[in-house]
Image: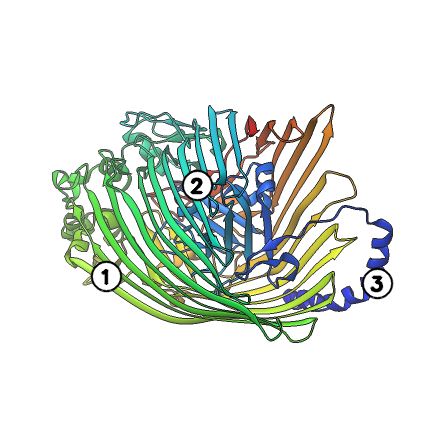
Amino acid sequence: MRINKLLRSAALAPVLFAAGVSAAHAQEETTAGDRAVEEIVVTAQKREQSLQDVPIVVTSVSGELMRDAGVRDIRELTVLTPGLTVTSTSNETYVTARVRGVGTVGDNPGLESSVGIVIDGVYRPRNGVSFGDLGEVTRIEVLKGPQGTLFGKNTSAGVINIITAGPTRELTAESEATVGNHGQFGFTGALSGPLTDTLSGRIFAAARARDGYQDIVTGQGPRGSHDDNNQNFYTLRGQLLWEPTSDLNVRIIGDYTKRDEDCCVGTQLFVGQAANSRGNFVNQVRPGSLDLTSTPFDRVGYANRSTAQRVEDMGLSAEANWDITPDITLTSVTAVRDWRAETGQDADFTSADLVYRPADGSNYIEFTQFSQELRLAGQAVDNRLNWLVGGFFAKEDLNSRAVLRFGADYYPYFASRVLGGAPALIGLTPAAIWQPGTGSDDRYNQDGKTFALFTNNSFAITDALELTVGVRWTRDEKQLVTDYNTTGASCDQGEAAFGALAGAVGAAQATTIVGGLCLNGQNNDFDDLGLSIQERTEEEWSGTAKLSYRWSPDIMTYASYSRGYKAGGFNLDREQQIVVAGGRPNFTADPDTSFKGEFVDSYEIGAKTSWFGNSLLLNAAAFYQEFKDFQLNTFVGTAFVVETIPEVVSRGVDLDFIYVPQIEGLTFQGGVTYAETEIQPFTASDLINPTRFNSLRRLPGAQLSFAPRWSGSLAGTYERDVFDGLKLKTNVSAKYTSRYNTGSDLHPSKEQDAMVLVNARVGLGAQDEAWTVELWANNLFDKDYLQVGFNGPYQVDENNDAVSVYNAFLGAPRTVGATLRFKY
């Protein structure tokens, strides 16, 4: 009902705008001065267009605004973009971008992103592969809603399209140095200019370091670092632009980034205080392993194992544009990329030695990707038709080694928690079960190929009315080869002792005990699968149809339909089934970890307008999106499981504006998104595995996690000449989000209250910008907030809060500093 009212109101927009246009022009004559918004060029339809001509919701953020707001990567971009949420979890390579509340949790490499990230025309296979320092950026375009026709693959919720600064024909050089609290230091340098008459180049380098802003209690180690969430990386980016003729140009880009950091230890969000709580049991085994009274924003974590992460990212791309005729252009984008992350983790988030992933390089994820895109575009029918046809191919090799080991304290903790500290009384053999260092060591090799053919065409039916139609055919092939390896005999021992256990403590308690001994990482039934091979092939159609009408030079309205598609795949974690035969449970390996593709149908009505002599750009749209088989990745305390939720509906309104008032040097940019992103009711029988329903029981009919109903951003920049030859420049950027839940199971303890984050910067320098010194603060008011809430691993009973622990990964605290910039 609400969306029907919303759409009816939006449908009146053309009439209201048309009726008011004469009055608006009259007002422009009396209020407009010399200031106006410069034309904003975007490539949302793979060709350069004015933002006001594109029938898509696009938030365009210039490189200058990013610099003014202190934005260096896609996570920080959220302060400038309403409706965009970016989070990271157990290490900073697990990054998830969400648009209008919709995205794919990034902790599992088997799932591809709903929000695609494209950098200089090259699709990145996962959000985490794109989280580094972006360097010099011309602009970033956030395209909201499915973009399944033109942008690579798997863009069912949106696209973040990043265009970096290219080589110049004039010689330019810049550098900057930054210092800040938490021991922060950074340096960047850039040089651009001609090399020959037809060749120009650009090189950018950056190095940044920072101490961690979280204190760590290590207990008896062996971890040596007593802080976490630090920063230590460098990046290089070189470009060549070859222009042998006026009809041909080739841009070659190479980049390399290396990170060596520690991240991320979860803090205690909620700790049950019952005598049989997880926290008390941990402290019985290893006293002082948790402070049961601490709160998350004490910023104290507990970890006896290393959280070192070493990331290496490199790539090479070439984009060629050939004007075959004045009206036809052939574009080729070829790229190869290699990304590898070696990560350690204290997987129990305590300073007891329970469970961990080693930081010796054996636990890693690696992506190698080759991609090729060809596009032929042109104009015809007296320039009334803009047509485009193309093809896309990507080959992705994903290699992952997932190592999970149980420490010296795990089985004593388990015995105390479940067995009452007396395992020998019920027939178990401690020497065969309590084996520190046992666990799982699994290898995943996924080979993926994507083939696509697409076309996107805009035809001006009249001078005011334009129809755009796009279609894409995609074939997605995946093959996963898995080699499961398990050490330790706890599961075999437990299943063999079930009869004695049932006689001593009853069948229900015996099942709980055996279940604890047969967790995924302890069940050597997986080894019986040998080299497990899974394959899937999908062929799907996606596309769009848009009808736009320009009522005047300042007002355009449109209506659109888009069909988006995100490929299915495989869960890169163990999945098991419980088979009960003769009253005995048998915990068996599930060889099928596949999940289905995700689809979305999106409807949108919008308007692009300019007012008061083009000093105000005001764009608005109402949207309605239906997602089918939504891919949900959730942590259930012992493993990640993937479920396809039958239906998720997202509906609401987007509004963006840019305003330059008649005050010289003052500019505002911002917007508001209202989105009801709701999971439609479902039952256990609708799931891949009905036994998971209990863990997801809060979801039917609820607002999706990480989906605030309200989100708004506002950035204000003011600059003016002061004194003699000096320029003052200030910026304040703020982001508001209403309350939302940060846990995929929607447990109430994981809710984040409504909040406002503010960044601020003030600079003074030469009028020609030869030098500038800036003072800045990110999260100026030191707002405490959650990134992600999650269940503490290895609980007694996740449905009983009195005995459970909930943890959280936190947002960054206030950081302050100074930056000195030079232009040569």
Q: Nearer the viewer, residue 330 or 110?
A: 330
Going by the image, does 255 lie left or right of 508? right
Q: From this view, report whether residue 575 is shown above or below residue 299.
A: below
Q: Which residue corresponds to the image point at 81% horizontal and 47% vertical from the top-left?
A: 33
Q: Nearer the viewer, residue 659 or 120?
A: 120
- Is the C-beta separation of discs 2 and 1 under 8 Å? no
Q: Secondary structure at mark 2?
A: loop
Mark 2, other Cα within 10 Å: few <14 / some 14–19 / many ≥20: many
Res. 582 image quadrant: bottom left
Q: Secondary structure at mark 3?
A: helix
Mark 3, other Cα within 10 Å: few <14 / some 14–19 / many ≥20: few
Label 3 amino acid?
Ser
Query: Taking the image as drawn, is residue 521 in sight?
Result: yes
Circle 3 is placed at which residue position?
A: 22
Q: Nearer the viewer, residue 275 or 177?
A: 177
Circle 2 is placed at which residue position?
A: 132
What x and y, as percent, mark residue 104?
A: 44, 54
Res. 605 image quadrant: bottom right
